Amino acid sequence: MLEYDVVSASEPADGTLVVLLHGRGADRKDMRSLAGQLPRSWTIVLPDAPHAAAPWGYGPGHAWYRYLGGNVPEATSFRTSLAALDALLDGVPEAVGFRPRKLVLGGFSQGGTLTVGYALSRPGRITHALNFSGFLPDHPDVHVDRGTAAGLRIFWGHGFSDGNIPLSFAESGRALLEGAGAVLEARDYPIGHWIDPVEASHAVAFVD
């Protein structure tokens, strides 16, 4: 089971449960700044990825998968994280004390990539996907077609000057999702590889 923190709603909860996935080499504390920009009526879950980042050269934190280059995650490590998210989402409603009206999965960089992969490999499991600077993963379990993407609500924000995951990755991934019928809000920002407060506000408006 993934270790996680819960940021409980500080106003009456509106039934929105958000799970935020950190980037490569980070940990769950890294997403607290984004959590602080979300509505206080939302309950937010911040998990650690299941893999140690150091053996792959990613730093002292955690990783969702080993990166092979381009838009390709290593298949087994990625699949392990998909299964870990299954277990997390199965158990979180009991842990937070309510059945969510909206179940939102979002993430930054590697976390954004896993979010997209999870949404496409588990159609209908979540209500909204928030991808901040991730890419559409080329993985055996991730298929982009009408059966997986039609009606999928996904916000995809990206930086024009992203030196880690180029904007071209966003453009090609978005085109495939739109072609398969996803409900996609695509926004680009004059930033690099990070999340801008304006971007966060746009994601909130998308979920609301």
Image (spheres, grey):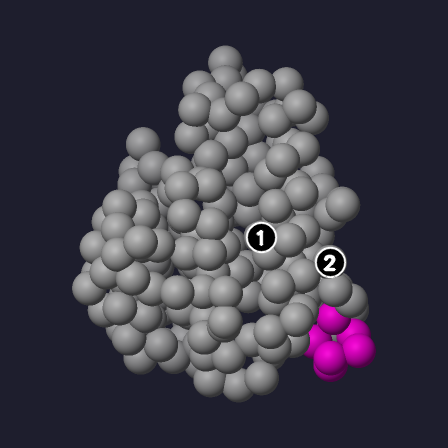
Tags 1 and 2 in contact by the CB under 8 Å rule?
no
Q: Is residue 9 visible?
A: yes
Asked whether 84 or 104 is in front, the reply is: 84
| Residue 204 is one of the magenta-drawn residues | no
Q: Position of residue 200 (x, y in %)?
A: 39, 47
Gap between marks 1 and 2 measured at Cα: 11 Å
Q: Classify 30 as above or below 97.
A: below
Q: What residue lies at 40% left-to-right and 42% top-to-bottom? A: 124
Q: Classify 41 as above or below 56.
A: above
Q: Position of residue 14 (x, y in %)?
A: 44, 19
| Residue 55 is one of the magenta-drawn residues | yes
Kindly state the secondary structure of the residue where label 2 is placed: loop
Kindly state the secondary structure of the residue where label 1 is placed: strand
- Residue at far top of view: 12
Which label is found at residue 21?
A: 1
Image quarter in which the C terminus is found: top left
Residue type at tag 2: Pro
Query: Left or right: 102 with respect to 150?
Result: right
Q: What residue lies at 39% left-to-right and 65% top-to-bottom? A: 143
* Magenta-colored span: 53-58
Query: Left or right: 186 with respect to 119?
Result: left
Image quarter in which the N terminus is found: top right
User: Label 1: few (<14), some or many (≥20) within 10 Å?
Assistant: many
The residue singled out by tag 2 in the image is 50
Asked whether 205 or 63 is in front, the reply is: 63
User: Label 2: few (<14), some or many (≥20) within 10 Å?
Assistant: some
Q: What residue lies at 61% left-to-right and 46% top-to-bottom? A: 86
